[in-house]
Amino acid sequence: MKNLVIITAPSGSGKTTLCKEIIKKEDKVQFSVSHTSRKMRKNEKNGIDYHFVTNDEFLLGIDQGDFIEWSFHFDYYYGTSKFQIEQSIKRKTPLLLEVDVKGALEIQKLYPDQTISIFVEPPSLNDLKIRLEKRGSDSKEIIEKRLQRIEFELSHKSNFDFIVINDKLEVATNQILEIIKNQTKGVPYVT
Ligand code: ADP
């Protein structure tokens, strides 16, 4: 039964924004809150957007095998906790996972029978650059580094079940909601 919905994308394509819209419109889908050691951005809340931890706490989590996948980007750790995934598989409830491309490939490989994967693409590289600049959370150097990863990330898009272009936010949100509804038929939603 497919109840793990992975949203993946090159950084800046809008996966966080889309996940928030999806959760707002479909409260029967739970959001998997990742862990990170990066600093909290304005408007973010601990335990809701991420579990914000220190580098040491994150390293302890790695040692304890708490993460199904983790990565280190630009000085900070990011990881998906095993607990929430296993709980949702046990309960057969839909879980929305926002992960980078490498992590998405790993989760897909670990849970091939439970996973629906959606790759979110920006309308163009130029739009992506503008979005990263507008977001205002990264220095020029970090934006450059994020853009350097894009080729690797785009080269994997055919590994995912669906590709959604995030041009108009509402259109992309509705496309993803449609995919979730169609693909999770039979999954008992959380009430
Ligand atoms: P990601 O999580 O993939 O790194 P974000 O959700 O943080 O991306 O989005 C990056 C920036 O682009 C944010 O400032 C966000 O408000 C903006 N954004 C997201 N989706 C759209 C869209 N469809 N049109 C215009 N701007 C968008």
Image: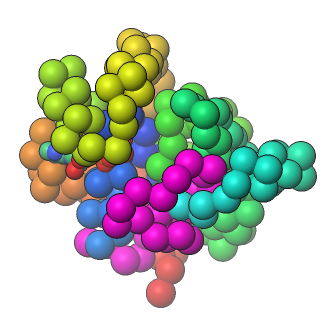
Q: Residue furthest right?
A: 64
Task: Give yes or no for residue 127 being in the magenta stretch.
Answer: no
User: At 55% from the left edge and 36% from the top edge, which residue is drawn?
Assistant: 104
Residue 180: x and y in percent read 36, 56
User: At 67% from the left edge and 59% from the top edge, which residue is drawn?
Assistant: 53
Q: Quadrant of residue 105?
A: top right
Judge whether residue 51 can be spotted in this image.
Answer: yes
Q: Up-down: is 168 above or below 88?
A: above
Q: Up-down: is 17 above or below 94?
A: above
- Total labels: the figure holds 0
Residue 28 lies left or right of residue 188; in this view the side is left
Q: Up-down: is 32 above or below 45?
A: above
Task: Give yes or no for residue 36 being in the magenta stretch.
Answer: yes
Between 166 and 48, the one nearer to me in the picture: 48
User: At 48% from the left edge and 58% from the top edge, which residue is drawn?
Assistant: 40
User: At 23% from the left edge and 35% from the top edge, which residue is drawn?
Assistant: 133
Between 161 and 142, the one nearer to me in the picture: 142
What range of the chain is rendered magenta? Answer: 25-49
Residue 183: x and y in percent read 40, 53
Between 42 and 80, the one nearer to me in the picture: 42
Residue 146: x and y in percent read 40, 25
Residue 83: x and y in percent read 74, 63
Residue 98 lies left or right of residue 164; in this view the side is right
Quadrant that contains the N terminus: bottom right
* Magenta segment main secondary structure: loop
Residue 159 lies left or right of residue 70; in this view the side is left
Ligand 1 rendered quadrant = top left
